[in-house]
Amino acid sequence: MTDPQFVLAERVQQALGTAFGTEYATEDPLIRPSQFADYQANVALSLAKRLRRTPREVAQALLDALDTTDITAEISGPGFLNLTLGDGWIAEQAVRRLRDERLGVAQAAPPKTVVIDYSAPNAAKEMHVGHLRTTIVGDTLARTHEHIGNRVIRQNHLGDWGTQFGMLIEHLLDIGEEESLRRLAAGDGNAYYQEARLKFDSDPEFQERSRRRVPLLQGGDPETLRLWHEFIEYTKQYFNHVYAMLGVTLTDDDIAGESMYNPMLADVCEELLHGGVAEISEGALCVFPPGFTGRDDTPLPLIVRKSDGGYGYATTDLAAIRYRIRDLKADRILYVVGATQSLHFQMVFAAARMAGWLHDDVSAEHIQIGSVLGSDGKMFKTRSGKSIKLTELLEEAVVRAEAVIAERAYDPAVRRQIARQVGMGAVKYADLSVSHDSEYVFDFDRMLALTGNTGPYLQYATARIRSIFRTGSYDPAEATGPITLGHPAERALALQLLGFGSIVESVAELSEPHRLCNYLFDLAQAFTTFYEGCPVLKAEDEEMRQSRLALSALTLRVLLQGLHLLGIEVPERM
Ligand code: ARG
């Protein structure tokens, strides 16, 4: 690992060991970015009390023990150790990165099995922008874990089962199979559901038929199952269409919908009951995980089997977590799901812990996804108030993107292709660049802007670097240095480039794609400052030109790799 923070952390740890004894050599040196140097180590402040010395004394002892090859260090303020890397070291590391296919991203050793539950739209309800966001964030986490060498198992926990299918199948029979399936494949599932719901609420005969259909489905009546299957298949076609538009890596092989767990539910209940984890309460089978209370401090139940014998969302999730640990052998399970389901997952995890399924070697994490809001600050809907059809939203992004790039004259087919990449890039980047648990306002103008922290800005940054190489008839693959850092902007750019590996690892560790977005944005800005201050093609001499071309080529590769992990395609020109 040659990321600057790691190198400095190691150095300071060595010094901690030398100065205060080996038990201090594993202390976190608290390396942070600094205003007055490249980084600062804050450990002297945190250790002072324990060592019964002043922070400045601790910092002095560290400084005396520090190996200062390639770095300069000085004490500042109350006891910060300011650290500055030598230009020669930075330049040499940058050249090494150019030769490193992985650009400084380490391989996970040993690899972990990471199950990622994401997207998970409902076959009978709307797929809304909320699902779009879990899809996009989840996909980036999947790509990132794969890239660092973990074994990734995607699980699309489709809502494809439940009593509502009684009503939907009856509606399908009323409307006609062919017409129904056409509408479902076209993404009309939401309106379709609402029609069925309306009839259910207003027509007693329809309601009665729908109720009678439920046990037929659950009991496995062949004709009912066939209709249900058709329903799911055609809805899946629509989801796949959305995934394809977005360039999401989910395939049909990743579908592990609620229906898949149906055969396991009785056994899950059995195991919970016999293990003394669940108990019968008012006719229902419930788990009462300690620490969860409702109003009046009454224990809150997680209902595993309803009093009428039916199973619900919690039962399926308990079956799923058991399956993911026992059968899929997960080390980590990431649930990329709306923040509103937080209590549900806390209780499911607690129950799974009580059952002994979720043990200390496995971590189950709810990656909470914040809501996407409209400009009115409410949940995002179309103007008419109906919730929006996703494909239409994505198509609108493409149309608007075309306006962003319209002035440049390309062949129409190429232009459409670029518009698609820019439109989808804008939508995806908007989801990824804010921390996953915060809300944000869906705003086409902002996400499509060519300036600021947007997808199109980063895409444009890559296109601009490519055009430098095109203009000078140089090949980025042949720009291998050597690099010399004469100008502060060259140095700042090179230093930023060396941070890529640790950023990618932190995205995987903390499940926070916005860190990578911020890093890439800072990198693109560092490049802009460099490009404004340091002519590349018009450099003073060939050596300087080669050095700057090498920095440009490395910037291009890091941007492309980073955007690839974010699932954002990049047009050659823009
Ligand atoms: N289908 C659910 C919804 O739309 C999300 C499922 C998330 N995954 C899970 N294992 N519960 O809200």
Image: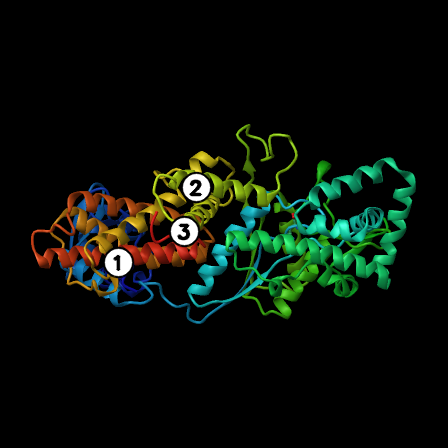
Tell which residue pokes out farthest to the top in this image: 376
Local SS, label 2 = helix
| Residue 558 position (above or below residue 298) | below
Name the residue at 44% across, 34% down.
445
Name the residue at 17% across, 62% down.
481
Tell which residue pokes out farthest to the left in this image: 541
Name the residue at 38% across, 41% down.
405
> Which of the two discs, 2 and 3, sits closer to the camera?
3
Give the numbered dot on residue 402.
2
Q: Look at the image and tell me whether residue 350 can be seen.
A: no
Local SS, label 3 = helix
Residue 217: x and y, percent?
Answer: 83, 58
Is there CB contact under 8 Å for labels 2 and 1? no
Is there CB contact under 8 Å for labels 1 and 3? no
Tell which residue pokes out farthest to the front in this image: 411
For marks 1 and 3 on the same chain, the one whose residue lies earlier in the sequence: 3
For marks 2 and 1 on the same chain, the one whose residue lies earlier in the sequence: 2
Q: Amino acid at mark 2?
A: Glu
Q: Amino acid at mark 1?
A: Leu
Give the numbered dot on residue 414.
3
Residue 180: x and y, percent?
Answer: 76, 49
Neighbour tally class for label 3: few under 14, some 14-19, many 20 plus, Cα within 10 Å? few
Neighbour tally class for label 2: few under 14, some 14-19, many 20 plus, Cα within 10 Å? some
Q: Look at the image and tell me whether residue 136 can be seen.
A: yes
Query: Which residue is label 1 attached to?
Result: 554
Q: Amino acid at mark 3?
A: Val
Snapshot colouring: rainbow
For marks 2 and 3 on the same chain, the one whose residue lies earlier in the sequence: 2
Which corner quadrant holds the N terminus? bottom left
Neighbour tally class for label 1: few under 14, some 14-19, many 20 plus, Cα within 10 Å? many
253 sits to left or right of 150: right
